[in-house]
Image (spheres, helix red, strand yellow):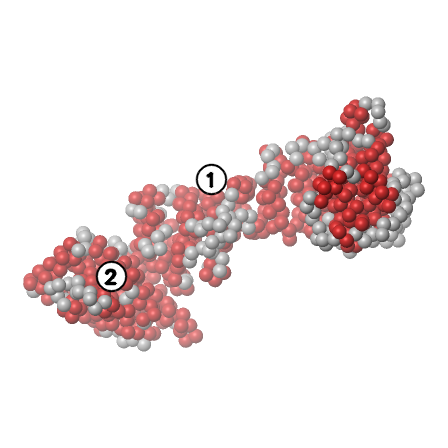
């Protein structure tokens, strides 16, 4: 049932709820009632039809929302007063809190949004006293707010009520700001003089309240500024009450008022900002890290207003915090950076954007790691606002800070996505690097990290190619991860003035590098072009970093490292091979599994480099192969370490491939593609040896070879049939025929109707095409002729 609600003496006497219901029912028309039934309401309790109070609230909300905002009369004043009285009734029932909040919001909007009183008076002419009517509803609002606070006097309820007023305090209309500030200060005064006010352990949103009042001190309307300063005193009094619960708070007497003026300063219209530093200093002991951040963010949030006074206020507040209280913000850096990023889209004034960016850069001077990590979380792909933030941050950094920034990004980029499970993070970091490296001042620092960043980007390219990035739920499209890394790689080369990108492009280098099938070729080509166009010192730094890739890196690291070592100088390759042998020799039993895997990943390169003409490389290969095969428990054939090349001892090659197929079946595909990779080597002995190795390895694999692998290798061999060197062409012809024979056998084995591919030679004869040596070929012209014919036949096909 509805109940009578009394009001305090000396204030406007609104009608009781029962009277309000009676009067309101008379005012409602049939059409209005029909429109109410059609409205959609947010009703979490779904109880509009269960309470007369809620039914009344719904009707009054609708009626107040329909009131015209360009006039005011006695009926509209009565309706607004009834609505505010009803909020008091609803607040007495806990479950009606949501309805009270909605009704209060509508009442406040209907009052504050009215035009200035003089405008209303001109429209009404002399028919009605507009000032008296407006004073009536304004007094009713302030009385209602005080009554609501007195029912549950606590700082939490104070914040709930102030939250209704805060948006109007930043209105572009001066009269709306004045009304909101007046109600805001009235409510603070009520709280400051209420001895029953309950202070929670932490005054939540205290920083927000200080920020809202400080901003209004700078208001162009001096009345608003003076009131805001008074509000600071009331807020400080509430805090003092929290500090000393025994202090008298029933009134703010003249003595206390003067004390607060001395501590916080007085309002100076010509220089309102002179007290900001003192205000923050006095409140600082009561502010937590979170609350100080709220104060800073409140100052930043007002910059979307195109108002010079607001800009000055924001700059003053942020400057004081960043100069004197930055240590309070250390745990809130991600939130601050995210807020700056979100604000940029609505800040159009250049000077306001400068203030926001200054906040970020000032924080970065002290908390570079935190700022960088927060920036990396802003968005992906990086949009123009995040790009602007990276650009400004880079531009404002000193040389030492820029070095720190790049090292932080490099460390993030070096994470193994297979370990973390996050394949997006390296792409974000690479995109950030691209923005940073585009700033001209970064060139010197880029030279410092150039080798490490270059190799890291290449390894991440390999990761991204081998592990497809999942569909991004935000953009609902398949990302092309390699493109982010390649763009960063190109920017790096330009930043350090390595202008060989065009030469690399002419040989389809980028296309090969980003291809899942030809990536290894692209890495080799990149290494070759880099070596031909780089300074000696840079090469030494790169090679120095590559040694750990071979020793401790995973597959992606090792493939990149091998590609570089295959392309450089003999002395470097010899040293790398020797180091690998030493590592195997000193390996302990507890590392047996890891070392065994390393040997299997590098044994093919060791066999192939054994064919080089440089004696140091040959000797080191013999040493390392001897240590490696002992570790595997395999006695290496004596002929392997003889001075003669494989084409003079093919039986040795045949024995090696037979052993690998029989003992290491799980690694056969790796062996195949490593051999295929070396067929592109610029070194003739290695290119020739890798072709021969492919042919014998596939011959022994036989049915174990996958058709897709055979097709790839077959295509590569057909290209090699046109090599400029005759010995390579001959080796390719032999290997091609062996692959051809295995393919033929697989076809015949899967389909009985399939005829042999080679009509002149049956399957058994083809499998036995193993020329004993180059000597026998030279002494047997008919054999040589048959091979040439075979080559021509394959060429035609």
- Image vertical order of residue 752 relative to residue 492, above or below: below
Residue 201 position within the rendered picture, expressed as x and y whole percent measured from the top left:
78, 56
- Image vertical order of residue 147 relative to residue 113, above or below: below
The residue labelled by disc 1 is 440
Residue 5 position within the rendered picture, expressed as x and y whole percent measured from the top left:
88, 47
Q: Give the mark toward the camera: 1 or 2.
A: 2
User: SS of the residue at dot 1?
Assistant: helix
Q: Nearer the viewer, residue 444 or 494?
A: 494
Q: Nearer the viewer, residue 459 or 368?
A: 459
- Name the residue rendered at 52%, 41% in the picture: 384
Labels 1 and 2: the sequence-earlier one: 1
User: SS of the residue at dot 2?
Assistant: helix
- Name the residue rendered at 34%, 61% in the picture: 576
- Name the residue rendered at 32%, 64% in the picture: 670
| 413 to the left or right of 526 | right
**Residue at the front extreme, as displayed:** 30
- Name the residue rendered at 46%, 61% in the picture: 418
Mark 1 crowdedness (10 Å alpha carbons): few <14, some 14-19, many ≥20? few
The residue labelled by disc 2 is 690
């Amino acid at each position: 049932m509805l109940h009578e609600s009394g009001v305090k003496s000396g204030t406007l006497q609104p009608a009781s709820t029962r009277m309000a219901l009676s009067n309101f029912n008379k005012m409602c028309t049939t059409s209005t009632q029909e429109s109410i039934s059609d409205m959609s309401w947010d009703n979490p309790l779904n109880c509009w039809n269960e309470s007369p109070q809620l039914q009344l609230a719904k009707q009054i909300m609708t009626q107040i929302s329909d009131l015209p905002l360009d006039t005011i009369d006695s009926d509209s004043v009565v309706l607004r007063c009834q609505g505010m009285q009803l909020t008091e009734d609803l607040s007495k029932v806990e479950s009606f809190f949501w309805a009270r909040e909605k009704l209060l919001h509508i009442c406040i909007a209907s009052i504050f949004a009215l035009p200035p009183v003089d405008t209303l008076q001109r429209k009404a002419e002399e028919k009605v006293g507009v000032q008296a009517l407006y004073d009536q509803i304004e007094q009713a609002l302030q009385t209602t707010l005080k009554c609501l606070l007195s029912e549950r006097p606590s700082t939490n309820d104070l914040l709930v009520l102030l939250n209704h007023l805060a948006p109007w305090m930043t209105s572009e209309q001066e009269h709306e700001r004045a009304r909101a500030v007046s109600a805001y200060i009235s409510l603070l005064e009520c709280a400051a003089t209420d001895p029953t006010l309950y202070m929670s352990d932490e005054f939540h949103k205290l920083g927000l309240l200080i920020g809202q009042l400080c901003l209004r001190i700078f208001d162009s309307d001096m009345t608003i500024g003076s009131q805001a300063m008074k509000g600071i005193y009331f807020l400080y009094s509430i805090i003092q009450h929290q500090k000393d619960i025994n202090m008298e708070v029933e009134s703010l007497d003249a003595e206390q008022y003067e004390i607060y003026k001395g501590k916080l300063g007085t309002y100076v219209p010509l220089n309102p900002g002179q007290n900001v530093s003192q205000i923050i200093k006095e409140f600082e002991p009561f502010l937590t890290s979170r609350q100080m951040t709220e104060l800073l963010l409140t100052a930043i949030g007002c910059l979307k207003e195109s108002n010079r006074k607001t800009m000055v206020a924001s700059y003053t507040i942020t400057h004081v915090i960043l100069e004197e209280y930055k240590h309070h913000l250390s745990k809130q850096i991600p939130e601050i950076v995210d807020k700056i990023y979100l604000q940029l889209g609505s800040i159009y004034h250049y000077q306001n954007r400068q203030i926001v960016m200054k906040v970020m850069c000032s924080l970065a001077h002290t908390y570079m790691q935190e700022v960088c990590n927060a920036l990396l979380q802003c968005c992906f792909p990086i949009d123009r606002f995040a790009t602007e933030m990276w650009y400004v941050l880079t531009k404002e950094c000193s040389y030492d800070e820029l070095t720190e920034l790049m090292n932080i990004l490099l460390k993030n980029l070096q994470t193994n996505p297979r370990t973390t499970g996050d394949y997006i993070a390296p792409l974000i970091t690479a995109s950030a690097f691209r923005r940073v490296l585009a700033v001209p001042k970064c060139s010197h620092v880029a030279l410092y990290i150039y080798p490490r960043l270059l190799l890291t980007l290449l390894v991440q390219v390999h990761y991204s190619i081998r592990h497809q990035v999942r569909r991004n739920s935000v953009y609902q499209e398949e990302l092309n991860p390699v493109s982010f890394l390649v763009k960063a790689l190109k920017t790096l080369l330009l930043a350090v003035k390595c202008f060989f990108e065009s030469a690399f492009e002419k040989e389809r280098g980028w296309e090969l590098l980003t291809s899942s099938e030809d990536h290894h070729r692209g890495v080799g080509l990149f290494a070759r072009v880099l070596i031909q166009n780089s300074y000696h010192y840079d090469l030494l730094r790169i090679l120095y970093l590559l040694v750990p890739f071979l020793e401790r890196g995973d597959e992606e690291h090792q493939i990149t490292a091998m590609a570089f070592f295959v392309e450089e100088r003999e002395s470097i390759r010899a040293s790398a091979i020797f180091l690998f042998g030493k590592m195997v020799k000193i390996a302990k039993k507890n590392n047996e599994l890891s070392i065994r895997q390393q040997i299997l990943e590098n044994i093919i390169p060791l066999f192939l480099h054994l064919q080089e003409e440089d004696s140091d490389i040959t000797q080191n290969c013999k040493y390392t192969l001897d240590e490696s095969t002992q570790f595997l428990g395999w006695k290496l054939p004596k002929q392997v370490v003889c001075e003669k090349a494989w084409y003079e001892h093919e039986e040795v090659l045949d024995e090696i491939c037979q052993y690998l197929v029989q003992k290491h079946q799980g690694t056969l595909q790796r062996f195949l593609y490593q051999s295929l990779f070396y067929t592109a080597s610029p070194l003739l002995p290695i290119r020739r040896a890798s072709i021969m190795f492919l042919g014998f390895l596939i011959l022994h694999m036989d049915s174990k070879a996958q058709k897709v692998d055979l097709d790839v290798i077959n295509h590569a061999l057909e290209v090699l049939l046109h090599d400029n060197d005759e010995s390579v062409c001959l080796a390719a012809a032999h290997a091609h025929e062996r692959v051809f024979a295995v393919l033929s056998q697989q076809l015949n084995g899967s389909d009985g109707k399939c005829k042999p591919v080679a009509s002149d030679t049956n399957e058994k004869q083809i499998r036995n095409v193993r020329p004993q040596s180059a000597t026998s070929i030279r002494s047997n012209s008919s054999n040589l002729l048959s091979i040439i014919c075979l080559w021509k036949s394959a060429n035609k096909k």
